[in-house]
Amino acid sequence: MNPRSPPWDAPTVRLNQADLTLILSLGDPSARGACLVLYSGTVPGRRYDLTDGTLSVGRSPDCTLPLLESASLSRHHAELQVSGDTVQLRDLGSVNGTQVNGRRVEDTVTLKDGDMLCLGDLLLKYFQRGSVDALLHDQIYRIATVDAGTEVFTKRYVLDALEREIRQAGRSGRPLAVLCLDLDHFKAVNDRWGHEAGDQVLREAAAAMHGSVRAGDIVGRVGGEEFLVVLPGASLAEAQALAERVRAAVAARQTMLRQADGSAVPHEQTVSIGVVALTEGMAGARDMLAAGDARLYAAKQGGRNRVVG
């Protein structure tokens, strides 16, 4: 594979000088560790930090760096030995091989800043400790995947994540559930207080959702006031309990909305939630989301500010 001809469509991100100055000023370069950045697959731009020790890379969930989205990887494809500023790579007898800058790895290779790694059909780039380019990629990845209005993931990201987790659940048998959420009577907030107030309510509600889920759960905004939470490893009962926690957190969060005369009044937002777990009868994300939307509709028809699962 020619590393200069990447097998993916890379979107153009335009940065002006002010953007670049801000990016370069963020953080202490000496504190940034070595990392790999994924350049292909379903989540291009994802960063994998490399900590000291022996790191296994492959399709198996028990790898230190599991790259689950590509069937071209072996379960235990390659290994990284990380010691301070030195990172060495070796192939573990993988079926489709490992390349660095277009050359197949036959023995241990010491990586250099900017090296392009090809594992099966996945392309990654290696950044040394303190790399300014790595920080730039972090910022671009954030621009591409985080909703600016709410600081949760974008619709595209969370739907891609759901597809990925469904495939993983099919391989491993691990349970999977989702929450479909809709802010109650949100149009009335915009109509009465204006869109700036509506944006504030959205941010506060999203923060309450994000603060109530588990590490590893994926919260995304999929519409104006609609959200989706992907819950890897959660059974229906666990998802229902977590949904109730999210509902209560949103309802308890008070937002102060400013009136035309400058005074502020408290606003308490509520949310309706539909809960669904992946079952054998579901063909994929479309079936799962349809079931979640039906339960969300039932929650709204039942009086709102409630969970149906």
Image (cartoon, grey):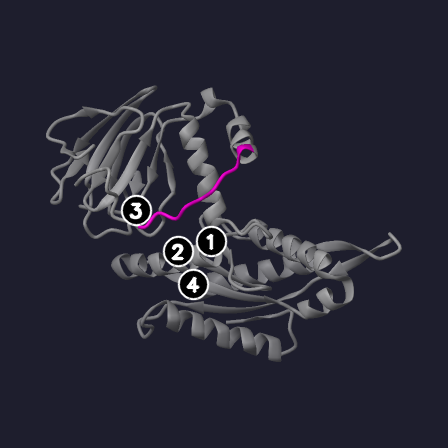
Viewer-proximal residue among 8 and 193: 8
Marker disc for residue 218 = 1
Residue at point 59%, 58% (across, down):
246
Viewer-proximal residue among 204 and 214: 204
- Labels 4 and 3: the sequence-earlier one: 3
Give the Cα distance between marks 3 and 1. Answer: 20 Å
**Amino acid carrying mark 4 in the image:** Ala
Q: Secondary structure at mark 4?
A: strand
Above or below residue 167? Residue 130 is above
Dot in front, 4 or 2: 2
- Labels 2 and 3: the sequence-earlier one: 3
Viewer-proximal residue among 17 and 29: 17
Marker disc for residue 40 = 3
**Amino acid carrying mark 1 in the image:** Ile
Give the Cα distance between marks 4 and 2. Answer: 12 Å
Give the Cα distance between marks 2 and 1. Answer: 8 Å
**Amino acid carrying mark 2 in the image:** Ala
Magenta residues?
9-17
Marker disc for residue 161 = 2
Residue at point 46%, 20% (across, down):
30
Residue 97 sits in quarter: top left
- Labels 3 and 1: the sequence-earlier one: 3
Residue at point 33%, 68% (across, down):
284
